[in-house]
Amino acid sequence: MTATTIPKGKRTAATLPPDEEKLKYFTARQWQLVWWRFRRNRLGLLGAGILIIYIFVLIFAEFLAPYGGTTLDSEYVLGPPQVARFWDENGFSLRPFVYSVTTERDPVTLAMIPTIDNSKRRYLQFFVRTKEYKYWNGNLIASDLHFFGVDEGTIHLFGTDSLGRDILSRTMYATRTSLTLGVVGVLIAFVIGLVMGGMAGYLGGQVDFFIQRLIELIRSVPDIPLFMGLAAALPKEWPPEKVYLMITLILGFLGWTTLARRIRGKLLSLRKEDYVIAAQLAGGSNARIIARHMLPAFTSYIIVDIVVYFPYMILAETALSFVGLGLRPPVISWGVLLQGAQNIQAIELAPWLFIPVIFVVFAVLGFTFLGDGLRDAADPYN
Amino acid sequence: MLRYFAQRFIFMIITLLFVSVVIFIVIELPPGDYAERYAYRKLASAGQDVTEQDMINVRHEFGLDKPAPVRYFNWITDIILHGDFGESFLFNVPVRNMIGDRIWLTMALASTAILLTYALAIPIGIFSALYRHSFGDYLATFIGYIGLSLPNFMLALVLLYFSVTVLGSSAGGLFSEEFAEAAWSWPRVVDLLEHLWVPAVVLGTANTAFHLQTMRATMLDELNQLYVDAARARGIPEWKVIFKYPVRIALNPIVSYLGFDLGKLVAGAPVVALVLSLPDAGQLLLQALLQQDMFLGGAILLMISTMIVIGVFISDLMLAALDPRIRLGET
Amino acid sequence: MDIGTEQIDWDTLLEVQDLKVSFKTDEGIILAVNGISFSVQRGQTLGIVGESGSGKSVSTKAIMQLLPRTAVVDKNSSITWHRENGETVEITQLKKGGREMRRIRGGEIGMIFQEPMSSFSPVHTIGNQIIEAVLAHRQVSKQEAREIAIDMLDKVGISNPSVRVDQYSFELSGGMRQRAMIAVTLSMNPSLLIADEPTTSLDVTIQAQILELMNQLREEFNMAVIFITHNLGVIAQVADEVAVMYLGQILERGTAKEIINQPQHPYTQSLLKAIPRLDHLGKRLTAIGGDIPSPLERPGGCPFHTRCEQAISGVCDTQIPTLTPISNTHTVHCFLYE
C-alpha cells in the first residue's frame, strides 16, 4: 500500500501539463527511467562526479601535471607541500603565488631542512610551455603546454619525495596506471565471468554443476596470498611493463568468480520469468531470446556489478605494490607511490608522502557511490 | 543432515587437494629450480665451481629429476605423513621449525578480528536498520564507507602514529620486549592480548564495514517480511518480534561468510604485519615471497589455506544448524 | 452515518468511525483511507470488497495498529473495541506496541494474511509459532501449549498433526500453510478474525476448502470475521454484510443478499457485471472503463465519477454524495439516489 506507481522523476518535469507528463513517463525508455531515478540520488551523482574528474586526470595527466613523473628537483628534496596563497604581509595579489624555497641537508642530523624565502614570490602561470611530452610515443600529439607552472624556479603543491620528484605530478601519472590496470583487470574478469556465468545459468545441468564447484574451489583459496604467491613467482628480471601486464592478468583471472555467480543467478531467475517462457513458446530462437528479452533485463545489473568491482581491483593493486610484490618502479602507480611511506618515520618526517592515499580513498568512494546509486536506479520498473 | 555433512566433508577434501596443487604450481613457477639455487648457495659459497654433474647430483638428491606429478606426490605425502614441508632456502632450516608459533599467532589475530567484527557489525547493523535515516544510521553508513575505502595498511600507519604521539608507546609488534622471546606463560598471553587489538582493528575494519552494510540491508529486507507483521499480530512484544525473527534470519548470511571472513583477514595479514612489524606467519610469508623462498612461502600458503577451507566447512555446518532450509535440502 | 444504532439488538464488537489514514511519501501525502465507518457484530461476517489500492487492507491494519511508520491516522478517527466483559477500548488511543494493544492483537482480534508462504518464519517450526502465540495469551505451561497446538492443527484439518507441529512452513503445501495460519490465529481464541484476502493466492479448489473451513470454524468458535477480498464471488459465500470500497471510501453497504441481488451503486453494479456466471454463459463480460486514479490525484466529488457511466456532470465531480439509505440495512453514497 505504501508503494506508489507515481514516477519518481515526475516532479522534475512539473512544467508539462499532467497528461503529457504522464505520457512522457509511461513511454520513456528504460535508460531514460534509470537516469531519472539516478539523478535523484545525491551520493550517486557525487560518485559520478568524482570519477569524471579521475577520467579527466587519466586522459590529460601530461597536461595537468606540472612536471614529468620522474623529473628530479635537486633543489627541493623531500620538501613539504608549498601553499598557493593570494596575500601576505607584503600585500594582496590577484595571481596566486608561492614562496621560493630551497632545502639543504643538515650536516649533523642529515635531515633535509627547507628554507622559505618570504621575500621572493613566485607567481603561478597558467598554460605555460615548459617540458615537452608526447602522447603514445609522439605518434598522436606532442606538446609542451602545461596547465600551470611558476614564472621562475619550481612549484610543488604536494611536496616532493626523497629524490626530489613532484608528488602531485606523480600522483596524476599513478592515477592513469592504477585506473587503467583496474579497467583492464575488470574487463578480463567480466569477460570470463560473463562466459562462465552465462554458460552455467543458461545451459544449467552438468555444466552448471561443474562451474559452480569450480567457483567454490577458487573462492576457497585466499586471494591476496595467492596473488602474492603468483606475483612473487614472476621473474625478477622481467621489464616493468611485462610485470604490469601479468599483475593485471592475475587480478583479472582470479576475480571473475563473483561476477560469474551474479550473472548465473540472474540468468536462472530470468529463465523462469513469464515473458521469457512466452518468447520460448512463441518459437523465438535462443539467440534472439537472450539478446532481445534477457540481456536488456540484466544489463543494468551487470553494469552495477562491474562498477562495484573496481574498488576491489584498486585496493588489491595498492596492497600488492605497497608490499613490493606488485608493480615496481619505474612504473608509477598508487601502490608504488606509497612504497616510500611504509613506516612510522615517514609519517613523522614527511607526512605529505601519504597524499596519494587520499586519491585511492576517493577513487574507491567514487566507484562505491556510483555503484550504490546505479543499483538503486537499475530497476526502474520496480 | 548426514547427507549434507558428508557432501560438505567430501567437498572440503577435494578443495584441499585443489589448493595444494595450485600451491605446488606456485612453488614451481619461478624460473630455475630449487636445485640450482641450492647448488649455488652450498657449493659456490664454499668457493667451488658448480659443475653440470653437481647439478645432476643435487637434482637427484631432491627428486627433482622426476616428472611433476611424482614431485607433487612426494611433496604432499611428506607433508601429510611426516609434517615435512621441505627446507627453507632463505634460512637453511626445515620450514617446519621456521613456522612454529607464527601460524597460531596469525590465527589468534584473525579470530580476534572476527570477534571484533561481529561485536561491532551486528548490533550497529541492527540499530541502523531499526532507526533508518536517523543520525546514528547516517554516521554508521559514513564510517562504513570510509572503512571500506581506506587501505588497511594506511589505517595501520595512522593507528601507529596515533599510539606513538598520543599514547606515547609504539603499537607495533605483538609482544612487549620482555616477552618477545619468552616461553609461553600466563603473563605472556595477557601481554599478547594487550597488543592484539591494534592489528585486529586494522584487519577487521573493512570487514566490519562490509558486514555492517550486509546486516543493515538484510534487516531492512526482513523487517518488511510478512512474518514480522504476523508475529506482531499475535501480540508478541516488539523486541521479541525483532530479535526472534528478522535478527535471527539476518544472522544467516553472516554465519555463512565465516570461512571467507577468515580468508579475507588472513589475506590482509601480510600487509598489516609489514607495517606493524608483527612476528606472525603473514610477515614470514611476505619475506619468503619477496626472496622467492618458495618452499617456505608455499608451506605458509598451504597452512593458511587449509585453515580457511576448514573454516568454510565449519561455517557450512553452523549455517545448516541455524537454517532448516539448508539442513533439509530446500534451496 | 452509523448503521449500528439501527441494529441495537445485535451485540457490537468493533466500531470504526470516520477512519482516515494517510501516508507521507516523497511525492506528497497520499490519503489511503478517507473517512470510512463500519461496525462488526458478534458472530457475524463483514465482507469488505474493493480493488487493490482501495484502502481495504490499510483500514484493517489500522485496527491492528500494524501500519508502517509513514502512516498517519487522523486525530478524529475512532476505532472502538468492545470486550466480552463489557469494557470498551479506544484502539487509536493505545500505545502501538504497548501491553493493552498486545492483549488485543492475537488474543482478541486475530489476523490472517494473503500470503501463507511468508506469514511463517522460515527458520522456526510451525509448532514453535503456535506455542509462542498460545503462551502470549493463555496461562498454560509449555507442554499444554504444545498440546493445544497439535489439537488446533488437527481442528483445521491437517493430517498427522503431532508430526506436522515440528515441521517448517516450507515443508507444507500452500493450502496446508493457510490452514496452519488459521490454527495459529485460532489457538489464541480471538473473538474477531480479520482475514486479509486469505484465499487469493491459492488454487480454486483449495480456496473452496479454506472458505468451507473458515465458515465451519467461525460457527464453532462463535467468532466475528472481517473478510477482505477483491472477489465478489467469494464474498457471497462467506459474508453476512458487505461493504464496497473504492479509493479509500465505502460506496455501498448492505447485507450480502442485497449487494449481490440489488446492487445500487454503479461501481458495485459494474463489479458484478465483471464476474463470469453460469447463467450468463456466452455473453461478454464488461470491464470497468478507465484506470483507478492515482492516489495523488484523487478526483473531487464522488471518487468514482471519473469512470462512472451514469455520472451527472456538474454534480458528481464537484459535490460529495452523502449517505442515502435504501433499506434498513442497505446504504449507498450516490447522487442517483439522493
Image (cartoon, coloured by chain):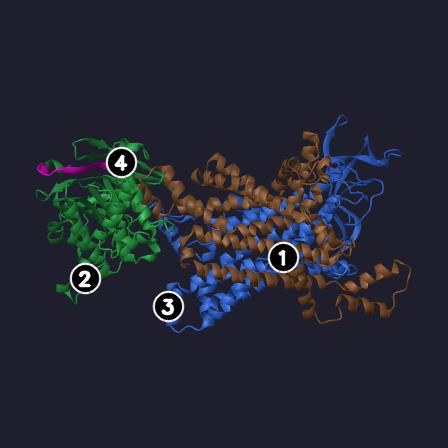
Q: Which chain is green?
A: C
Mark-to-mark CA distance, 4 and 1:
60 Å
Report x, y in % for residue B284: 71, 50
Q: Residues within 10 Å of mark 3 (few under 14, many from 20)?
A: few
Q: Amino acid at mark 4?
A: Arg
Which residue does the image show at 85% across and 34% down from the upper left? A109
Q: Which residue is mark 4?
A: C103
Q: Chain of mark 2?
A: C
Along the line of sight, which residue is nearer the eye, A164 or A87? A164
Q: Relative to C271, is B233 above or below? A: above
Q: Is residue B32 magenta?
A: no
Report x, y in % for residue A134: 76, 56
Mark-to-mark CA distance, 4 and 2:
43 Å
Mark-to-mark CA distance, 3 and 4:
50 Å
Q: Name the element at disc 4.
A: helix
Along the line of sight, which residue is nearer the eye, C163 or A93? C163
Q: Residues within 10 Å of mark 4 (few under 14, many from 20)?
A: some
Q: Amino acid at mark 2?
A: Pro
Label 1–label 2 contact, CB within 8 A: no
Mark-to-mark CA distance, 1 and 2:
60 Å
Can I make out residue A225 in this image? yes
Q: Name the element at disc 3.
A: helix
Q: Which residue is mark 1?
A: A183
Q: Earlier in the sequence, mark 3 or mark 1?
A: 1
Q: Which chain is brown?
A: B
Q: Residues within 10 Å of mark 1 (few under 14, many from 20)?
A: many
Q: Which residue is mark 2?
A: C276
Q: Name the element at disc 1.
A: helix
Q: Chain of mark 4?
A: C
Mark-to-mark CA distance, 2 and 3:
26 Å
